Amino acid sequence: MLKWLAQVGVLALVLLFFRILGGEAAKNFARSDISFGFDWLGDPPGFSIREGIDLQPNSGIRALAVGGLNTLRVAFSGIIAATILGTIIGVARLSKNFIVNKLAGFYIETIRNVPLLLQMFFWQVLLMAQSSLTEGDVGSRIFSVSNKGVASIWVFPSTGFWPWFLIFLGGVYLSRKVARKRRTYQEDTGENGHPGLFGILTLLGIALVGWLVHPLLGFLSILWDGIGDLIGAIPAATVSLLIAGAAIVAAVVWIKRFLDSKRTPAGLGKLTDDDIFRMIFAGVSALFVVWIAFKVGGAVIAKPDGTDASVAAVLRDSFANIFYWFGDKFTGEAGSPLSVSKPAIELRGTGGFVQYADTGILATVPFFSVWIAVTLYTASFIAEIIRGGILAVAKGQTEASQALGLRRGQYLRLVILPQAFRIILPPLGNQYLNLAKNTSLGTAVAFGEIVAVGATLINQTGQSLPIVIVWMAFYLILSLSLSGVVNYYNRRMALVER
Amino acid sequence: MSVANNKDVIVCEGVKKWFGDFQALKGIDAVVKEQEVVVVIGPSGSGKSTFIRCINRLEAHQEGTIIVDGIELTNDVRNIDKIRSEVGMVFQQFNLFPHLTILDNISLAPLWVRKQPRREAEEEAMALLERVGIPEQADKFPGQLSGGQQQRVAIARALAMKPKIMLFDEPTSALDPEMIKEVLDVMKELARSGMTMIVVTHEMGFAREVADRVLFFDYGLVVEEGTPAHFFDNPQHDRTKLFLSQIL
């Protein structure tokens, strides 16, 4: 009982703390004539963004979305690049070759001991010192570096991409089945069934056939549009009801499963305070979602196109729009799935303004500075994690493998790496989170990510608190998604112990 | 057991090994005949583990020659591979692969080194598990087994490669007393079946009962060598007498 009182007491203290801070802030905001709200989400922001999917966003929410997508773009490409580079450096650090080993050590020690912000400045300064584009450069290139950024040839999904991709996914499924069949054959007979070769050939074959016949899937656009129409026809009030219902069902199912997991053959086992608290928490969370669904769902906001609609209706329409978007991509007149695009340098306007055209892939100076800095920086930490993970696998494992006659490549793949991966994964996930959060430093080199865009919005609207809340919610969701993925793999890889 | 007329399968001449400045082996001469069980005893640090680890090249010797089944151990990788597939080894710390089931632990090397079909490899693995007395553990992971069971799996894993020679590096030293017997029983059965074995151990009862010959190591040298009866009842060397008086 005392334990419960103590917990409730602590909770009350925390709430009181925020109540005092919040009340004080509200008073002062009121005095300075600022009223906080979320109207700015729909209002035109009054500024343009230098890069992203929409350079002239027509609403605050759209501007933040452009910034958020820029953050995601640099974070995900950074995570992939840092993982590859970090693995190479980490393995090089273990190399017996003196030069390779020392070079990797030098890389790690210099990069990880210089603040990330300074590294971003370094790359920015270095790029801005490149020669500028002149009229003599006009024309298309494979690769180009200038003080406007780094441009390269790239492969883009083209008009026929999605129908072809659907066929390709079918090919992935089929090729896995073929490979499995060949493996069973190999295990039954002992003859080499070449499962990998057969799988790849199947996939290539289907991808090639799909390249030729994908316009046949054009009829699917009717299906996609139909689903979109169906969703669009749901009354707005029903959306709130559906969300509320889903929350309640989820909570009930969770509590039931939780109780089942505590059930022993002798009946329901004893529940600890913690168990009871978890169930109460699940129930309260569901009620909270219900409250939000009806309270916020009914609120009317201005849509970007100027009309008014309830939040629930906007939510429903954007969900339906996903299917309309797919419908658009599945028109029968689709062209080739992928197209190669070379960067071009062009003369724009009459004043002789030389710049990159919208072809190829262009990493602007801010994007490139942020991307290369977070990649190199995080790779130095990942390298140490990889090295530590491999070293942490007991030496006896190598010796046992060698004594059995396994070759180096075989025991690395079959024995050492699967065990090292378990050790590597949790700290690797931390580095991914760090990288994603560190991209917010990009605001210092004028990269239009969510913090930079939000800061400009604060300047324009004065709505500091709501925008800070949106920032925090964005990074929270991003981080939780990342760690969710990492934890999922971590659980799957866990060793069975007694 | 009479193995006097069998051919020599391991011949060591003047084997020397240094770890930095420390000389672990100071010139070992030893011969092991086919189907012979040789027990190596001696105080810790005497070089006995280093010696058997040199036989399958987990440690490289620097001087002298080691010839296993007619193949000389050199830096030639092909020779090392060949010898390792004929020499099985059991370690003090078991060294099972914790991420693989018991069955996969045993069938891993036959699958990848001998390129056996999986079904065949798994059938043989099951037969070996029967032989060491724990077929019911096939689908468990090493972490779920007791030490004695793990060491029996390790023996089965080494046997799966159908070796001609088995090396045991203090196989019972990491076990609780009540589990030692189950491992020694498996080793005795193996010895009776005619396997050539070199066993580093502190189990004097095992040496007396099973060994054809005992080698006594001290400071990197073979100090005394003989049949168990000769060795335990009538040792010649003062160092051997002192050692035996301390442990018996």
Image: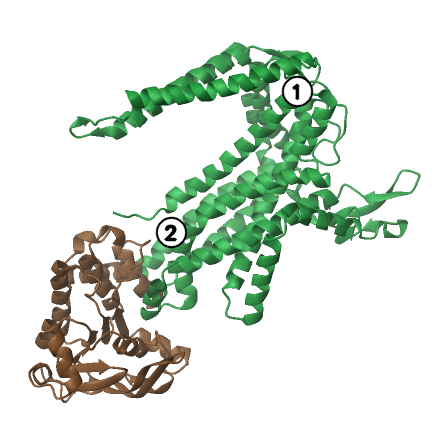
Chain colours: A green, B brown
Q: Are marks 1 and 2 on the same chain?
A: yes
Q: Is residue A307 left or right of residue A479?
A: right
Q: Which residue is mark 2?
A: A181
- Mark 1 / mark 2, whichever is N-terminal: 1
Q: Is residue A466 left or right of residue A419?
A: right
Q: Looking at the image, which residue is at 29% across and 21% down?
A: A2
Q: Does A310 appear above or below A50? A: above
Q: Mark 1, mark 2: which one is toward the viewer?
A: 1
Number of disc labels: 2
Give residue A226's position: percent from left, percent from top.
56, 21
Q: Chain of mark 1?
A: A
Q: Secondary structure at mark 1?
A: helix
Q: Does A447 appear above or below B178? A: above
Q: Does A147 appear above or below B119? A: above
Q: Looking at the image, which residue is at 26% across and 62% down?
A: B94
Q: Which residue is mark 1?
A: A41
